Image: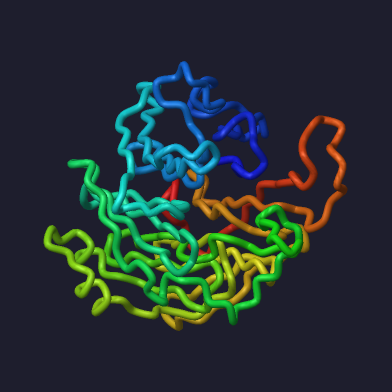
């Protein structure tokens, strides 16, 4: 699990055992950003575990203003398997790469970049060459929709404006998911009314162009404001509903959204991911407002998080 960079954590990524024990991931030096480590982590925004057990980490570098990168960690060999840096024009000055999907059917890595909203884009990295390209920048499907309620309630996701008010940044395209057969890439902006999709086969074509993507883009289903999606083996899409403080599902046949569980603690449900046990895991900040004083254990205010799990309608791919 990546740890929210806005809270300046000592460990950028952690491993949580079944007993609840938390340890640095992949190792102590990397997790703490130690400059003596060959690949120190800076700001881990997303992780994915592939079928071989390799963990892919998306480091957006915005904590220390470092170049963003994708790191493949092989837990069996306890070592870095690959590192790919993202550079202009694939990234722009306001980039905040936020989610990653490693394609099982090609050497492609798909990355969402909500950036500053109007310049939100999809980045496609070819890990066989290290070349990355930026697509659909500024398309309405990737931008935040201001008509969708997303109230800043001091949840830890906000930034303060010059006038003292709060706003939630980086609400453009964020979650990326693909069905088990690799037929469709689904994505959505956090602050939007819809999930969109693109054909997986098109994304894998070597002569991919902007025009081809625009023509193939499909509005798939309605959804509430959400920072996280995942998909099970029957193509049901699970949604972390921010306003409803719930987890819902978009039915694969009817394409309609229905809440399946809710809890007042789910201030900002995120990180939806299937485990090896078939359960659906996610985490959430569990307090909307907190004291302005530092807690006794030295943490800054507003750092109360919990992990949850629920039984999905159908199992999904572990690590996705």
Foreground residue among 166 and 123: 166
Residue sitting at x 50%, y 41%: 44
* Residue 252 versus residue 227 in the image, above or below: below
Q: Is residue 236 visible?
A: no
Q: Position of residue 63 (x, y in %)?
A: 55, 40
Residue sitting at x 63%, y 29%: 10
Q: Position of residue 159 (x, y in %)?
A: 67, 56
Residue sitting at x 76%, y 61%: 164
The picture quadrant where one finds residue 37 is top left
Q: As drawn, which residue projects farthest toward the front?
A: 162
In the displayed structure image, the side of residue 302 where residue 192 appears, left or right: left
In the displayed structure image, the side of residue 55 where residue 256 appears, left or right: right
Task: Count all numbered tags in the image, as a single digit.
Answer: 0
Q: Position of residue 198 (x, y in %)?
A: 30, 70
Q: Is residue 121 visible?
A: yes
Residue sitting at x 50%, y 74%: 250
């Amino acid at each position: 699990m990546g740890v929210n960079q806005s809270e300046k954590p000592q460990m950028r990524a952690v491993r949580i055992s079944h007993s609840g024990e938390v340890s640095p991931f992949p190792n102590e030096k990397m997790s703490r950003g130690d400059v003596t480590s060959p690949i120190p982590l800076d700001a881990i925004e997303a992780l994915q575990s592939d079928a071989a057990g390799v963990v892919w980490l998306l480091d957006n570098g915005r904590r220390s203003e470092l170049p963003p990168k994708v790191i493949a960690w092989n837990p069996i060999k306890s070592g870095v398997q690959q590192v790919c840096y993202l550079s202009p024009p694939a990234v722009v000055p306001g980039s905040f790469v936020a989610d990653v999907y490693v394609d099982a059917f090609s050497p492609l890595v798909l990355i969402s970049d909500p950036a500053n909203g109007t310049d939100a884009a999809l980045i496609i990295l070819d890990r066989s060459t290290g070349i990355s390209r930026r697509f659909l920048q500024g398309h309405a499907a990737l931008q935040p929709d201001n008509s969708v309620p997303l109230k800043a309630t001091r949840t830890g996701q906000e930034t303060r404006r010059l006038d003292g008010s709060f706003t939630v940044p980086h609400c453009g395209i964020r979650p990326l998911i693909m069905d088990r057969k690799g037929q469709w890439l689904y994505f959505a902006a956090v602050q939007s009314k819809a999930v969109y999709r693109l054909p997986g086969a098109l994304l894998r074509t070597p002569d991919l162009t902007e025009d081809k993507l625009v023509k193939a883009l499909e509005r798939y289903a309605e959804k509430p404001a959400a920072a996280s999606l995942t998909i099970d083996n029957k193509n049901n899409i699970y949604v972390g509903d921010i306003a409803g403080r719930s987890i819902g599902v978009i039915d694969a046949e009817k394409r309609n959204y229905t809440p399946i569980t809710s809890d007042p603690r789910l201030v900002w449900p995120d990180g939806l991911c299937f485990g090896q046990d078939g359960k659906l895991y996610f985490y959430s900040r569990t307090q909307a407002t907190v004291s302005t004083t530092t807690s006794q254990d030295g943490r800054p205010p507003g750092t109360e998080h919990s992990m949850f799990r629920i039984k999905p309608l159908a199992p999904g791919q572990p690590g996705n």
